[in-house]
Image: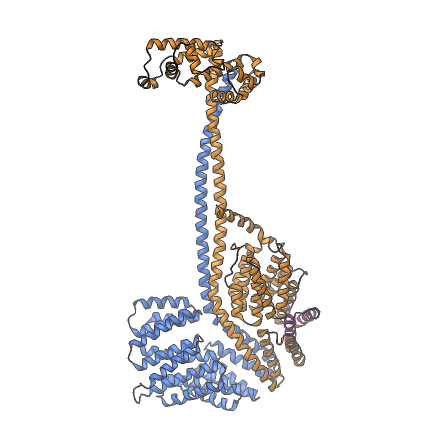
């Protein structure tokens, strides 16, 4: 039951968490923003910062987000093995439930890893599936919005690599559409998007447009402190100057880019810059510089490539892990659906069963009422007080067939004695003696000049009930008859009716009344009222 | 680039091994071999099937090699290692020294692929220690020694230790020269000479490098191995580029391009395009630079993607399996939901029927009671 409860709780949590996630802890997202900024300044610092946060935060979603930044920082360093490890290794968390937000975030992480390692098709496959799922929902939450912006950015990079530039540009617009201007991360993604756009423009020979865009980004970057991004922008500006055959400007920008990131640990970016510098030196026939840069490029590239290989080897292993999580997510979702169906059905069934039993008890009560009113009608047909009881006599002054066997077994009462007692009982029924509060088996036996044993035997055998039921029935029949025939009684209080019927308490009267007529005294009075009104 | 030429060498080594085992008729194994990089999953399943019914130890060794290589392609080094060790066990069953050495060399190549260089060196040492047991005056002995040193040299070269690599490769060539001339010896010599040329290039001795590329080209010509010829010419062109003789470099690269036209070797093509682009750049022929630069970039992308093919296919297998599992899961729960719904509806229907019946009865009673009261 506890499990079921927690299942339902997590379901409702799940329903809202895709949108609500991120609003629970604003402090956390300030720290995340700081970590992202650090990644663009010094990857090692960012990694240390995030890892200290990870140690103190066991929330599953928080862990995912922090680990992703660590992974990003490692990828910027060119340490792909650690990057894969950080983003895909199992997370120990107190909250094993995977919310839809974390599911999207996991997809995003994996898609980025695939892209880093050159597995563009895999990256594209995941992004397409994830984005088509998200398209159906309106997103308000800032953390989800920026994740969607990053998903579009990744998709755009994939499209760019596959030379689908128009598509890539559209995806960048989608990415920008999900950005706001509130924090560092938003600014970083927006600037990155603008550099990516310039790359696509350059590839389509729109170098002037690309140059303008880059210069704009660079002027904004000069007011910020994102050395990695600055290097990225300068590198691409240098590329444009290279295409314009302005080798000295190209070299100057490449040097500027290099100076921004040197000794900060951005190995892949460094390697790329060395390669470009080598190439431009070669074009300028500066063979000394060419050899120097070529050497540095080969050295760094060998390292990056080896790391990439390790990363690929590891991701193949960890993909299994990711798939297991994915399956867990679906299992949890399906289970929840099943619980809901089962609960709704069970509730319906339970409700109907309860209703059914209410109906059954109503049927019993109606049956009793029917019998009683039938008797009452017969009695009122004869129009005498005693007539109610006449009927009883006719029915009951014969030994009951069912009891015949018992009769033989029990005390033998002579036929004469029996007849005598029955006769006296008839007399008692026609009198009001049974209304006396003192009426008991002993009293009646004394009144009828017999002993309690004989009297009890005769009542049991001929009336089909024990003494108490017999007297109670006489009393109720009497009062019911009065109620029906004399409207004055309808105005009396139930406690008074109980009193005149010989019951010592209001509640005993009500219980007995209901058990015999199927109606409470009040309901009975109401019925009579209704009849009178009609 | 280094990697690729290593591959050509491996291919010659492995094919030599297979010829010795006369398994060319075994088309299934051949299929498994061709599929290794395209569809390693399939190679593995074919090889595992073959393994169940195969009794011939030579064939079993080949199957283990295929399995190990296919697992390398999938980057599953644990499994690959398992089959290498099994392959190694097969040499205990043979007394043929030549075969033992051949097997050990293949194993060393596998270790090299897995980048377990120490293991590779160990295996090569083991192979070399067996050389002393080689039959006297058997000229294939030198071929074997040549191969052992060639692998050592290439491993050092891949690690960037050009000097040591050069020493090993030169020893290798000396031994190849002593062995009986044959197609496979010449092919191996061409590859080793090309690698020596590259070592000299790295050591900034383009003159010496050029002489080895020329020699490499000569051997390639002898056996009409166009790809090796193209590699040698490309290497030679690089020495011209470094000496500032760009026109000559371009003409050599064009020759190399012609030879490689029908080979479809992406590494070779990329190198040729890159070389052409660089030389045209220095000559200020920007249009041609851009043309070849683009071709080089495209070929590079194609090569990188083709190297990831086996990874892609293995991830696809995982993903498809998982998709299948998710579908099964959804189907299972759909069934559960249907059963729950069906059962629930039956019970609800039955209850409705009972209630309906009861309501009618109660209505009848109420009416009768009303009648009785009124009457």
Q: Is residue A212 magenta?
A: yes
Residue B131: image quadrant is: bottom left
Q: Magenta segment, which residues?
A: A210-238
Residue A272: image quadrant is: bottom right
Expressed as whole percent of the image width and height from the top left, the position of residue B2 reads 48, 80
Q: Which chain is blue?
A: B
Look at chain A in the picture and name its colour.
orange
Q: Is residue A383 above or below residue B220?
A: above
Please tell me whether the stretch drawn in magenta is mainly helix, strand or loop: helix
Residue B44: image quadrant is: bottom left
Q: Is residue A313 above or below residue A332?
A: below
Q: Is residue B375 visible?
A: no
Work out whether residue A112 or residue A321 is closer to the camera in this orientation and state it: A321
Expressed as whole percent of the image width and height from the top left, the position of residue A525 reads 55, 18
Question: Residue A62 vs residue A347: left or right?
Answer: right
Q: Residue at x 38, y 90 (%)?
A: B177
Q: Is residue A35 above or below residue A250?
A: above
Expressed as whole percent of the image width and height from the top left, the position of residue A37 reads 64, 66
């Amino acid at each position: 039951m506890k499990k079921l409860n927690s299942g339902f709780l997590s379901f409702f949590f799940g329903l809202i968490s895709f949108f609500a996630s991120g609003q629970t802890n604003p402090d956390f997202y300030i720290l995340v923003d700081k970590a992202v900024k650090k990644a663009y300044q010094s990857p090692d610092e960012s990694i240390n910062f995030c890892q200290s946060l990870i140690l103190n935060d066991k929330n599953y979603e928080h862990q995912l987000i922090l680990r992703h930044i660590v992974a990003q920082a490692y990828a910027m360093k060119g340490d792909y093995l650690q990057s894969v490890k950080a983003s895909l290794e199992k997370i120990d968390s107190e909250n094993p439930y995977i919310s839809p937000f974390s599911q999207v975030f996991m997809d995003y992480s994996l898609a980025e890893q695939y892209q880093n390692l050159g597995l563009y098709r895999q990256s594209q496959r995941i992004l397409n599936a994830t984005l088509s799922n998200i398209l159906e929902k309106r997103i308000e939450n800032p953390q989800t919005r920026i994740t969607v912006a990053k998903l579009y950015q990744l998709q755009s990079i994939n499209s760019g690599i596959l030379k689908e530039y128009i598509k890539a540009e559209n995806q960048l617009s989608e990415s920008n559409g999900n950005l706001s201007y509130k924090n560092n991360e938003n600014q970083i993604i927006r600037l990155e998007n603008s550099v990516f756009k310039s790359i696509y423009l350059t590839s389509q020979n729109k170098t002037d447009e690309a140059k303008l865009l880059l210069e704009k980004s660079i002027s904004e970057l000069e007011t910020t402190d994102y050395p990695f991004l600055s290097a990225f922008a300068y590198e691409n500006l240098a590329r444009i100057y290279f295409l314009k055959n302005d080798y000295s400007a190209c070299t100057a920008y490449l040097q500027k880019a290099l100076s921004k990131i040197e000794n900060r640990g951005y190995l892949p970016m460094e390697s790329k810059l060395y390669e470009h510098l080598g190439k431009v030196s070669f074009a300028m026939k500066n063979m000394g510089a060419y050899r120097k840069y070529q050497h540095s490029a080969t050295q760094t590239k060998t390292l990056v490539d080896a790391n990439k290989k390790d990363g690929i080897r590891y991701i193949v292993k960890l993909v299994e892990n990711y798939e297991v999580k994915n399956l867990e997510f679906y299992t949890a979702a399906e289970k929840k659906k099943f619980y809901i169906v089962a609960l709704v059905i069970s509730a319906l069934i339970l409700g109907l069963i309860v209703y059914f039993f209410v109906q059954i008890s109503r049927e019993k009560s109606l049956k009793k009422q029917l019998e009683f009113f039938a008797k009452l009608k017969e009695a009122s047909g004869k129009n005498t007080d005693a007539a109610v009881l006449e009927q009883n006599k006719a029915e009951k002054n014969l030994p009951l067939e069912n009891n015949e066997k018992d009769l033989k077994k029990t005390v033998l009462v002579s036929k004469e004695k029996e007849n005598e007692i029955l006769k006296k009982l008839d007399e008692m029924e026609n009198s009001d003696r049974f209304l006396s509060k003192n009426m008991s088996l002993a009293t009646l036996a004394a009144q009828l000049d017999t002993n309690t044993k004989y009297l009890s035997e005769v009542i049991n055998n001929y009336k089909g009930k024990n003494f108490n039921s017999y007297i109670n029935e006489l009393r109720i029949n009497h009062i019911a008859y009065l109620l029906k025939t004399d409207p004055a009684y309808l105005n009396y209080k139930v406690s008074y009716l109980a009193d005149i019927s010989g019951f010592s308490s209001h509640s005993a009267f009500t219980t007995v009344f209901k058990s015999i007529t199927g109606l409470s005294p009040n309901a009975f009075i109401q019925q009579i009222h209704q009849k009178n009104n009609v | 680039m280094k990697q690729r030429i290593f591959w050509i060498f491996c291919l010659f080594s492995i094919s030599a091994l297979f010829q010795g085992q006369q398994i060319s008729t075994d088309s299934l194994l051949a299929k498994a071999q061709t599929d290794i990089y395209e569809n390693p999953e399939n190679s593995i399943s074919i090889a595992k099937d073959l393994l169940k019914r195969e009794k011939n130890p030579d064939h079993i060794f080949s199957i283990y090699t295929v399995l190990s290589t296919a697992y390398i392609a999938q980057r599953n080094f644990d499994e690959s290692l398992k089959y290498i060790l099994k392959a190694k066990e097969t040499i205990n069953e043979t007394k043929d020294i030549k075969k033992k050495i051949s097997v050990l060399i293949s194993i060393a190549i596998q270790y090299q692929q897995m980048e377990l260089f120490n293991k590779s060196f160990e295996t090569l040492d083991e192979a070399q220690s067996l050389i002393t047991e080689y039959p006297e005056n058997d000229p294939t002995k030198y071929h074997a020694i040549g191969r052992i040193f060639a692998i050592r040299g290439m491993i050092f070269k891949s690690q960037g230790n050009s000097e040591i690599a050069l020493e090993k490769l030169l020893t290798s060539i000396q031994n190849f020269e002593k062995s009986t001339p044959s197609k496979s010896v010449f092919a191996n010599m061409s590859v080793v000479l090309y690698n020596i040329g590259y070592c000299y290039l790295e050591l900034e001795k383009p003159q010496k490098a050029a002489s080895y590329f020329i020699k490499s080209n000569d051997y390639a010509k002898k056996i009409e191995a166009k790809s090796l010829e193209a590699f040698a010419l490309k290497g030679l062109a690089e020495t011209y580029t470094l000496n500032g003789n760009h026109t000559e470099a371009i003409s050599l690269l064009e020759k190399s391009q012609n030879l490689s036209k029908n080979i479809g070797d992406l590494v070779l093509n990329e190198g040729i395009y890159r070389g052409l682009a660089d030389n045209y750049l220095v000559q200020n022929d920007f249009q041609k630079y851009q043309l070849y630069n683009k071709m080089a970039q495209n070929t590079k992308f194609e090569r990188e993607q083709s190297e990831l093919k086996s990874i892609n296919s293995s991830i696809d297998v995982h993903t498809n399996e998982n998709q299948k599992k998710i579908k099964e899961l959804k189907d299972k729960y759909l069934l559960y939901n249907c059963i729950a719904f069906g059962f629930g509806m039956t019970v609800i229907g039955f209850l409705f029927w009972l209630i309906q019946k009861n309501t009618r009865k109660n209505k009848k009673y109420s009416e009768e009671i009303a009648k009785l009261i009124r009457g």
